[in-house]
Image (cartoon, grey):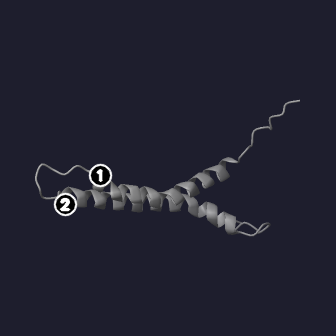
Amino acid sequence: MSLTPPPLFLARRSYRRRRLMDAARLLPLLGLVLFLLPVLWRPAATAEPDTARGGLYLFIVWAGLILAAYGLSRGLGPALAEEDKPEGAPDAEG
């Protein structure tokens, strides 16, 4: 007899939902790292800060985070609504 347990089977839908939830949890951390990234940039050849490029970068990151959150919420919406239904509840379709 083998001492190793059989591999754990995860349903595709619940696995995908859990990964989307993990991505949603990590999105604020990603945003923090991306917002703090300009601090590590080397200054330009001039003494004045390069605010135009930094401001444009922050706006693009901000818009990208909004789009990522929207995409994650669209992917998680139906799965979480299905999870909120009580067990044995009839489907709304018929």
Percent across and percent down for residue 48 are 12, 58
Quarter of the image for residue 3 reads top right
Left or right position of 89 against 69 = right
Percent across and percent down for residue 90 are 76, 68
Residue 53 or 42: which is nearer the viewer?
42
Q: Residues within 10 Å of mark 1 (few under 14, many from 20)?
A: few
Which residue in the protein does label 1 denote?
40
Up-down relation of residue 9 to residue 86 (above or below): above
Which residue in the protein does label 2 denote?
51
Left or right position of 62 against 68 = left
Percent across and percent down for residue 87 are 78, 66
In what element is the residue under mark 1?
Answer: helix
For the N terminus, give its image quadrant. top right
- Tell me the residue at 46%/61% (across/down): 28
Using the numbered discs, state the Cα–Cα distance from disc 2 to disc 1 in whole angstroms: 14 Å
**Residue lying farthest to the left in this orientation:** 46
Up-down relation of residue 32 to residue 2 (above or below): below
Residue 70 or 52: which is nearer the viewer?
52
Left or right position of 9 against 64 = right
- Tell me the residue at 67%/64% (across/down): 82
The amino acid marked with disc number 1 is Leu
The amino acid marked with disc number 2 is Thr
Foreground mark, 2 or 1?
1
Q: Badges 2 and 1: C-beta atoms under 8 Å apart?
A: no
In what element is the residue under mark 2?
Answer: helix
